[in-house]
Image: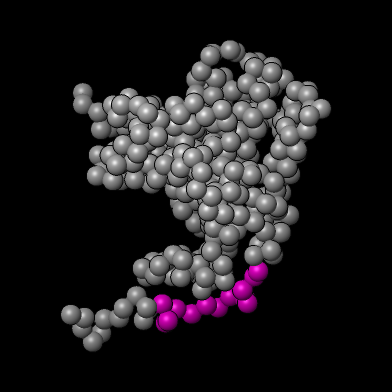
Amino acid sequence: MRSANEGSNSDRFCEIRFDYPAMTTLSEWTQRMGEQEMPVLAHTAQEITLSSEREDSSSAEIARIILRDSSMTVRVLKLANSSFFNPAGHSSRTISRAVVVLGFDVIKSLCLTVALINALLKDSPQQERVMVLMAQSFHAATQARSLAVACGNRAPEEIYVATLLSRLGEMAFWCFGGDKAKALDELLSTGVNPAEAELKVLGFRLSRLTRSLNQEWKLSPLLGASLDGDKGPLMKQIMLGLELAEKTELGWDDPGVLPVLESMAEEASLPLERMTEIAHRSADQAAQSARDCGASRLVRFLPSPSLTQPE
């Protein structure tokens, strides 16, 4: 029984003061992210997406977009030559060659990965929250893509991008939210339900910011369908990737991991042992990809299956 001096989470929730300006609208947050906080990500994403969707696009055109940023060029080439994105091992020393070898869809996913890292891996008061979310998204995207390949999906890159960006609004908010992020962090620390806390501080759920940014920047139709509640088979692969990344945060031996692996094995019509091998390898590949795109700081937040394997 609670003592007279103890208060419930709801009581503490009511006591917190909110000394910030009137709530900003979702559209204003979306505009701010695109014009002030992440203009390079927004512009690059739109350019690459539009270029890759045009029938008359050439490898030279998308290469020019990437080559404008020397950091992106180096990191995209590293990823393009990795075993995860290039299992056939065809070496690419130039962006144009990488586009020809891997195709627009793969290059688009690599560019969005690098652009996301460049935009959000910054020093901020809530940096650890950002890194945890980014590592989880990175891991989930890698797992979802591997599952899509195992299922014979013809568009694994669409699965990868949709999963990678599924929490974009949350990452952007914690990186650039300022006083609002501080207020939400304080409120969450009292144990208030995240949905209730987000509505109190912002007036909307952060998933709606993800949806708004996705629509505004034309990032991923598949992500839009997922956020709208589509229940198709592709959505299941996204969901399982996200779920596995969440469960393995507590370690690969956590009881919640096995049911997810069993669902993935069933989805891919593979034995559980084989699906587990694929998932372990994908986790290692997520860590290597993080290093390749200049995000080594994320590795410590990624679950390592090697730590649970017998010697």
Q: Is residue 194 highlighted in magenta?
A: no
Picture quadrant of residue 301: top left
Total numbered badges shown on the rendered structure: 0
**Which residue is rendered at x = 58% and y = 36% of the image?**
158
Residue at x-position 61% and y-position 54%? 211
Q: Where is residue 219 in the image (x, y as percent from the top left)?
A: 66, 44
Where on the picture, by quarter, is residue 114? top right
Q: Is residue 187 above or below residue 7?
A: above
Residue 195: x %, y % from top left: 46, 66
Left or right, 44 with respect to 198, comes to: right
Out of 72 and 25, give the one closest to the viewer. Answer: 25
Dividing the picture into quarters, in which one does residue 59 lie?
Answer: top right
Residue found farthest to the bottom: 4
Q: What stretch is highlighted in magenta?
A: 13-25
Q: Quadrant of the C terminus?
A: top left
Please name the residue shown 61% across and 28% down the image. Answer: 106
In the image, residue 93 above or below residue 143:
above
Quick check: 82 left or right of 59? left
Left or right, 247 with respect to 294, comes to: left
Task: Pick the quarter of the image with the N terminus.
Answer: bottom left
Regarding residue 238, the answer to whether it shows in the image is no
183 or 231, nearer to the observer: 231
Q: Is the magenta stretch mostly helix, strand or loop?
A: loop
Outermost residue to the left:
1
Question: What coloring was used for the rendering?
Answer: one colour
Depth check: give the residue in front, 282 or 241.
241
Q: In this orientation, does residue 252 appear?
A: yes
Residue 237, x across and y down, in percent: 46, 39
Q: Give percent across and percent down for residue 298.
A: 46, 40
- For the point 24% across and 44% down, the residue is 255
Q: Which of 286 and 55 is in front in this view?
A: 55
Q: Is 17 part of what is drawn in magenta?
A: yes
